[in-house]
Image (cartoon, helix red, strand yellow):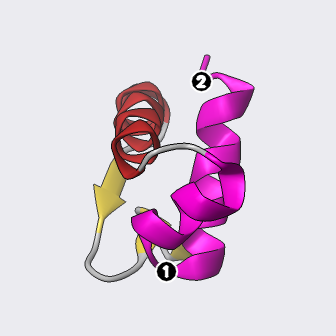
Amino acid sequence: MPSLRAVKSFVAAAKYHNFTRAAEALCVTQAAISWQIRELEASLYRVVGWSRNSPALSLRGGFAAA
């Protein structure tokens, strides 16, 4: 199960369409956002199949988060 921090990082990245801006909003580094997104990707890939489509982050099957 992904951490709440990873979910918050994903929501911020989707909202701002940018890891750096998401990091600034959450008062963490860009590297922390990237690491949390990787954690979320690993968790979700096992469950539903995950794809990172540039520039949007989305779940496979048409559910767009951006």
Looking at the rendered structure, the kind of residue marked 1 is His
At horizontal 60% and vertical 48% (from top left) the residue drawn is 9
Is 23 rendered above or below residue 64?
Answer: above
Q: Is residue 10 magenta?
A: yes
Looking at the rendered structure, the kind of residue marked 2 is Pro
Q: Position of residue 3 (x, y in %)?
A: 65, 22
Which region is colored magenta? 1-27
Between residues 60 and 7, which one lies in front from this camera angle?
7
Q: Is residue 26 magenta?
A: yes
Q: Sequence order check: which comes first, mark 1 or mark 2?
A: 2
Q: In this image, 48 relative to 12: left or right?
A: left
Select label 1 or label 2 by which is in front.
Answer: 1
Give residue 46's quadrant in the image: top left
Q: Which residue is mark 2?
A: 2
- The dot on residue 49 is none
- In which quadrant is the C terminus drawn? bottom right
Give residue 42's quadrant in the image: top left
At horizontal 36% and vertical 45% (from top left) the residue drawn is 34
Q: Main secondary structure of the magenta part?
A: helix
At horizontal 53% and vertical 72% (from top left) the residue drawn is 21
Q: Position of residue 61 (x, y in %)?
A: 46, 68
The answer, for residue 63, to whether it is visible in the render is yes
- In which quadrant is the N terminus drawn? top right
Between residues 53 and 48, which one lies in front from this camera angle?
53
Label 1 crowd bin: few (<14), some (14–19), many (20+), radius 10 Å: some
- The dot on residue 17 is 1
Is 64 rendered above or below residue 41?
Answer: below
Between residues 65 and 62, which one lies in front from this camera angle?
65
Q: In this image, 45 relative to 58: left or right?
A: left
